[in-house]
Image (tube, rainbow, N blue to C red):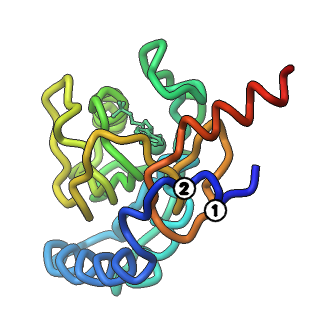
Amino acid sequence: MIKHDLVKEILISETEIKKRISELAVEIKNHYSNLKKPLVLIGILRGCLFFLSDFMMELDLACAVDFMYVESYAGQKTRTFEPKIKLDIFTNIKDHDVLIVEDIIDSGKTLVKLVEHLKLKAPKSVKILTLLDKKIKREVKIEADWFGFEVPDNFLIGYGLDYQEQLRNLPYIAIANLEKIKALESKKMS
Ligand code: IMP
Ligand code: MG
């Protein structure tokens, strides 16, 4: 796939992303001004890739990082099953403040599962930061504590977001040209 050809429209530019991340880093630093132990950032693989690293470099706080991998979409456009935790954190988060760092919230099911799971490990607090929020798609009751941008119900790619594990490496967030992607795929198969 030639990545830029599969973009229908750029929704959020690289500059806008960076600017919003700086604002979020300041808000979040202020929120955790009385930390007793390092904040543990938990990145949700694989979409958090660029957001987590850019955010963490902007965040002027003592923090550690760990990762989880939750299978929610199985690489498909629509979800076919309930989220399953495939990789858990290695860090002991007991009595630590924890911040989940997500790429996007859609139905909210992934986060409900994650929050439930992390709370069993007795952290001091669990909060959620997401770069993108498709509020209109929510099926369960969960909200991010901080979000970068509210986005419409389109299939988005870039800056970590994938279509079938590809197109994560666009520096901006774009609406995918699904018709073009599918046409290319069926040509490949015939
Ligand atoms: P949820 O459980 O429905 O909230 O799904 C959240 C997960 O689905 C996110 O962490 C993403 O990995 C994936 N996802 C949701 N919407 C999109 C999208 O537009 N593009 C790419 N991945 C998406
Ligand atoms: Mg994700």
Residue 175 appears left or right of 88: left
Residue at x-position 35% and y-position 41%: 154
Disc 1 residue: CB within 8 Å of ligand 1:
no
Task: Classify 163 as above or below 41.
Answer: above
Residue at x-position 63% and y-position 62%: 4
Q: Are marks 1 and 2 in contact (CB under 8 Å)?
A: yes
Residue 143: quadrant of the picture: top left
**Amino acid at circle 2:** Val
> Which residue corresponds to mark 1?
4
SS category of the residue bearing label 2: strand
Task: Classify 83 as above or below 106.
Answer: above
- Mark 2 Cα-neighbour bin, 10 Å: few <14, some 14–19, many ≥20: many
Quarter holding ligand 1: top left
Where is residue 9? Give x, y as percent: 44, 59
Q: CA distance from mark 1 to mark 2?
A: 6 Å
Where is residue 127? Give x, y as percent: 23, 52
Residue 135 visible: yes
Query: Of residues 38 and 182, which is closer to you in this image?
Result: 182
Residue at x-position 50% and y-position 28%: 77
The tag on residue 107 is: none
Where is residue 78? Give x, y as percent: 45, 23
Task: Classify 54 as above or below 139.
Answer: below
Query: Of residues 95 and 143, which is closer to you in this image?
Result: 143
The tag on residue 7 is: 2
Residue at x-position 54% and y-position 55%: 7
